[in-house]
């Protein structure tokens, strides 16, 4: 077990050094379990993702999960891309924040770097209302197209628009 | 906003000789409420667009309003065919966040029930997959064998489908009297039954003709689109979280990881089927070496993990189940994000289906073993 955790922490350090060269704008942090936390501003997200995917010898090629976290106290929505190397011990999370009060909070889509982001980004758009610029097919995925609002925002219940009956007209072209 | 009633979105570039066929959400071989819009050229599939969300039950929103312990039964209802591994993923996330040490015996029991669950889940897959391909008998056989496992689980925790057996810090209780003996009987019975299924179905010429070369996914595609579990291994990627990133007590056991080659429906099916033999091996080792001790650590009734976030993942029968858990230091989770393997695999469905016959889509959906409960959450 200790051998595996040694390998994890040495990989994490190597990844951090790699990012210092390939993505100097990123704010990095290594967790005890070997996860490298990478914080970047929205306009640098694609460059940071490419730097992660280009890490050798363990490219972070496997996107596990994209999670959106609403933080109304900070007026921000954080989008977390959890990525792993497959096969290999490297793991990282790329964190991008966007202003939640904007009319159309938008981030660059990372589908070009990790194709798996497709459905996950659609889900974040659907439930939290973050627009991903450059996404090939940004539609609601879990909720109906006629749904109004983004329910995983913390203030959704208070600010929910009055319920409206969906009529036949909604479905006519 | 306007939407066409039958097909959303109606593709604007539909060729003259192409048309759209609606499959589901009420369809016997979509395993629940999956809707797939098939774009066909005669009998050939040009595209298959999944449409999901019919079973959305706001799990992630509900979980934000309940305490950490109360969320455990909710996770049962996500992947309802493999409830034990779901609970395991969730309680592991809470334990990692709160820094709770789980007793050794509880870790072994977790492996025991997770592997029994894997066999039960694969048996359901085996039966329904055969049913999808037109063979009715294997379903009855598989459900008969699964009944043994459900009886064991019923003795263990009183429930047959949604167990809530995992607790934060351990498991609900120790094994009931007679459990080990009954499990050993099952271990003795099962290999011969599996060989019977193999001869009856997996080596059947009709089955091979229906599945070989269908729904092919290369190893690169499988990794890029986030495939996991047998869907990933069927494409020849040798990766199993139980072995490569051991959690619970998996690093104590010897087991093999079946890997396919061509990434077609047949290879995925064979990988899944062979996994059942490996699970039997693990269960036997657990029963032989089960340590004595507590089955549950002392955990405060009002659990307040320190603020932070954590991502844990386990190998469920379908693949990587991940939980991204955020705490703000309060008694309720600030955010629970569920990473469902079937959700990622659905993205691969169009990749797999392209160019095949309409009848093959049924085999392809069956081979990725989707459970809509965890896709829609």
Image (cartoon, coloured by chain):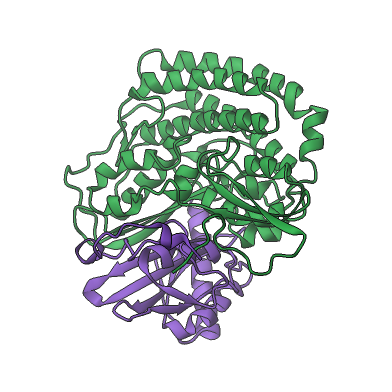
Q: Is residue B276 visible?
A: no
Q: In which quadrant of the rendered image does the N terminus of chain B lie?
A: bottom left
The residue drawn where x is 32% and y is 66% is A149
Residue A24 to residue A76: above or below? below
Q: Position of residue B327 (x, y in %)?
A: 27, 59
x and y, in percent, of residue B205 in the image = 83, 29
Report the chain shown in purple.
Answer: A
Residue at 64% x, 69% y is B12
At x 32%, y 29%, the residue is B293
Q: Is residue B86 left or right of residue B204?
A: left
Displayed quadrant of residue B48? bottom right
Q: Nearer the viewer, residue B21 or B368?
A: B21
Up-down relation of residue B201 to residue A76 (above or below): above
Answer yes or no: is residue A2 visible. Answer: yes
Decide which of B51, B329 is in the foreground and name it.
B51
Instruction: Give coordinates of residue B87: x percent, y percent.
Output: 38, 40
Total marks shown come to: 0
Viewer-closest of B292 and B181? B181
Q: Nearer the viewer, residue A116 or B316?
A: A116
Which chain identifier belongs to the green chain? B
Measuring 71% from the left and 50% from the top, which residue is drawn there? B235
Q: Position of residue A131 (x, y in %)?
A: 44, 74
């Amino acid at each position: 077990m200790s051998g595996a955790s040694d390998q994890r922490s040495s990989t994490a350090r190597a990844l951090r050094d790699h990012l210092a060269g390939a993505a100097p704008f990123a704010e990095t942090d290594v967790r005890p379990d070997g996860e490298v936390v990478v914080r970047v501003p929205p306009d640098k997200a694609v460059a940071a993702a490419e730097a992660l995917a280009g890490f050798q010898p363990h490219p972070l090629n496997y996107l596990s999960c994209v999670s959106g976290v609403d933080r109304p106290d900070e007026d921000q929505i954080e989008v977390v891309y959890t990525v792993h190397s497959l096969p290999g011990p490297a793991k990282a999370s790329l964190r991008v924040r966007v202003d939640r009060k904007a009319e159309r909070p938008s981030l660059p889509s990372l589908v070009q770097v990790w194709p798996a982001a497709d459905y996950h980004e659609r889900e974040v758009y659907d439930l939290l209302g973050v627009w991903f610029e450059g996404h090939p097919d940004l539609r609601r995925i879990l909720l109906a197209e006629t749904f109004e609002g983004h329910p995983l925002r913390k203030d959704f219940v208070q600010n929910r628009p009055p319920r409206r009956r969906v009529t036949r007209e909604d479905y006519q072209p | 906003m306007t939407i066409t009633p039958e097909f959303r979105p109606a593709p604007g570039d539909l060729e003259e000789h192409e048309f759209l066929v609606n499959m589901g959400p009420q369809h016997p071989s979509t395993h629940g409420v999956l809707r797939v819009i098939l774009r066909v050229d005669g009998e050939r599939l040009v595209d298959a667009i999944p449409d999901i969300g019919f079973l959305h039950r706001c799990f992630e929103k509900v979980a934000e309003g309940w305490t950490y312990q109360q969320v455990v039964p909710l996770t049962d209802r996500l992947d309802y065919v493999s409830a034990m591994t779901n609970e395991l993923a969730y309680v592991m996330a809470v334990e990692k966040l709160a820094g709770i040490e789980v007793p050794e015996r509880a870790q072994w029991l977790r492996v025991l029930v997770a592997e029994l669950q894997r066999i039960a889940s694969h048996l359901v897959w085996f039966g329904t997959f055969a049913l999808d391909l037109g063979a009715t008998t294997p379903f009855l056989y598989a459900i008969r064998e699964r009944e043994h496992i459900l009886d064991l689980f019923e003795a263990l925790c009183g429930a047959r489908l949604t167990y809530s057996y995992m607790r934060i810090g351990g498991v609900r209780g120790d094994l009931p009297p007679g459990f080990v003996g009954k499990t050993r009987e099952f271990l003795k019975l099962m290999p011969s039954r599996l060989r019977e299924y193999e001869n009856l179905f997996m080596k059947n010429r009709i089955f091979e003709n229906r599945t070989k070369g269908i729904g092919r996914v290369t190893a690169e595609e499988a990794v890029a689109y986030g495939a996991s579990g047998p869907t990933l291994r069927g494409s020849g990627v040798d990766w199993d979280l139980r072995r490569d990133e051991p959690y619970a007590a998996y690093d104590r056991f010897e087991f093999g990881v079946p890997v396919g080659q061509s990434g077609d429906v047949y290879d995925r099916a064979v990988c899944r089927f062979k996994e059942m033999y490996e699970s039997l091996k693990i269960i036997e080792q657990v029963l032989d070496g089960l340590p004595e001790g507590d089955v549950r650590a002392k955990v405060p009734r009002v659990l307040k993990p320190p603020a932070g976030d954590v991502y844990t993942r386990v190998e469920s029968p379908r693949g990587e189940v991940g939980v991204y858990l955020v705490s703000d230091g309060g008694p309720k989770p600030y955010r629970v994000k569920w990473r469902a393997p079937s959700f990622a695999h659905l993205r691969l469905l169009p990749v797999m289906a392209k160019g095949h016959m309409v009848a093959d889509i049924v085999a392809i959906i069956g081979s990725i073993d989707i459970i809509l409960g965890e896709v829609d959450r």
